[in-house]
Amino acid sequence: SQQGEEDPQALSIQEGENATMNCSYKTSINNLQWYRQNSGRGLVHLILIRSNEREKHSGRLRVTLDTSKKSSSLLITASRAADTASYFCATDAGNNRLAFGKGNQVVVIP
Amino acid sequence: EPEVTQTPSHQVTQMGQEVILRCVPISNHLYFYWYRQILGQKVEFLVSFYNNEISEKSEIFDDQFSVERPDGSNFTLKIRSTKLEDSAMYFCASSASIGQGGYTFGSGTRLTVV
């Protein structure tokens, strides 16, 4: 089954605005992680939220997790041009593998 | 900050040839992984490796694929007889534990099979 499905959005926002993207999944998880990928580059781990957590912050990032709805959101506040990238959620069901979503393309216009 | 290093960054190979993709995981990590991303598609799990053996593998990881940790630092993915559909970005990753922290990914090897 597919896990870690983001809303397949391409966001284009002005610098300084907030960017929100969502992710839904289908099975039980241990944690959910968000990664960033700049064009043609590797995946950079941004933040991990455990199944018993509801919200987590890291700098300008805020992640929420609703296990009853099997969904998560990533908010980037006060976006910068350098935030332009693809953002992926990935679920960890404790079986030693991550299941990635399709990714959200975010373009921040200076 | 510690990095996962992958070589080469780009490899072009003829269909049917064997390729070996190389990775140097973070030195104190115990779990190693290979993922791949076909252009424009999801990142897909291939295999995980712990304590010198495969701990999980996906349906993609068939008999054409193998992994090895030939020494204390390298972790390799071998594709015995490449097909056109093996063309993808291959990412190596490592983690210190399972389910406790994020994974550290390398920058990837872009494999092009012609």
Image (cartoon, rainbow, N blue to C red):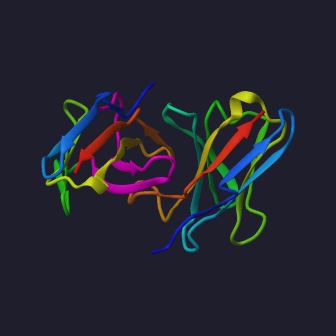
Residue A22 visible within the image = no
Residue drawn at (58%, 73%) of the image? B27
Q: Which residues are magenta?
A: A23-51
Image location (x, y in percent) of residue B96:
49, 65
Q: Quadrant of residue B113?
A: top right
Residue A28 among magenta residues = yes
Image location (x, y in percent) of residue A10:
30, 32
**Residue B49 higher or lower than B113, as above or below:** below
Residue B33 among magenta residues = no
Q: Quadrant of residue B111?
A: top right
B48, B21: nearer the viewer: B21
Residue B92 visible within the image = yes
B55, B3: nearer the viewer: B3
Residue drawn at (70%, 34%) of the image? B86
Q: Is residue A69 left or right of residue A40?
A: left
Image location (x, y in percent) of residue A48:
31, 54
Image location (x, y in percent) of residue B24:
64, 66
